[in-house]
Amino acid sequence: MDKYKGEERRKFPRANANFVVSYRLKEHPGTYDLSQTKNVSQGGMLITTNKKFDNGIQLAMTIRFPFVNQKIEVTAEVIDSKEIVKGLIYETRLKFVDLPDGFFKELGDFIKELLERWSKK
């Protein structure tokens, strides 16, 4: 895959990070699916899903980040959902809608630490 060579449009740095999240359509309680993140920033994340989501759909997510003890409950809005393996795997880009303020800072510190660690390799 070619790297994007244009101007950086992201508001927050993004780090590759793989961990498990559960998600569901916000308006359908109780029907969670599991996914894995591909990368994360303070503004959102990229996950793999087993179906395509329309832009603007809101997902209720439960995330267990490796640097906090409790699960984090957030709402994320689908920015894009692209088919990777026909009818099977999709990359779904999400924007956080209601990330708790205290956690926002912790997430930023975690990402900064990951990026610093990778830049030293």
Image (cartoon, rainbow, N blue to C red):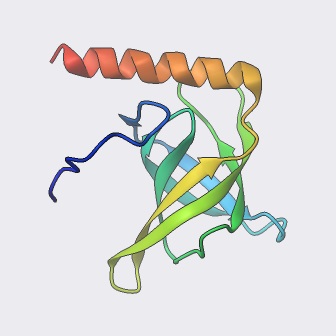
Q: Is residue 61 left or right of residue 36?
A: right
Residue most toward the bottom? 87
Residue 116 appears in which quarter of the rendering? top left
Classify 34 as above or below 4. Answer: below
| Residue 77: percent from left, percent from top | 66, 57
Q: Quadrant of the C terminus?
A: top left
Q: Nearer the viewer, residue 101 or 114?
A: 101
The residue that appears at 61% across and 36% down in the rendered structure is: 64
Could you say where residue 59 lies in the image, as x and y percent from the top left?
70, 60
- Whether 104 is drawn above or below 41: the answer is above
Where is the N terminus found, in terms of image quarters?
A: bottom left
Residue appearing at x 34%, y 39% in the figure: 8
**Which percent across, then down, holds residue 109?**
51, 15
Q: Is residue 3 left or right of residue 55?
A: left
Residue at horizontal 15 percent and vertical 56 percent from the top: 2
Q: From this viewpoint, is residue 2 visible? A: yes
Task: State the image coordinates of residue 120 (x, y, percent, origin top left).
Answer: 18, 13
In the figure, residue 117 lies in which quadrant?
A: top left
Taking the spot 23% from the left edge, 50% from the top edge, the residue there is 4
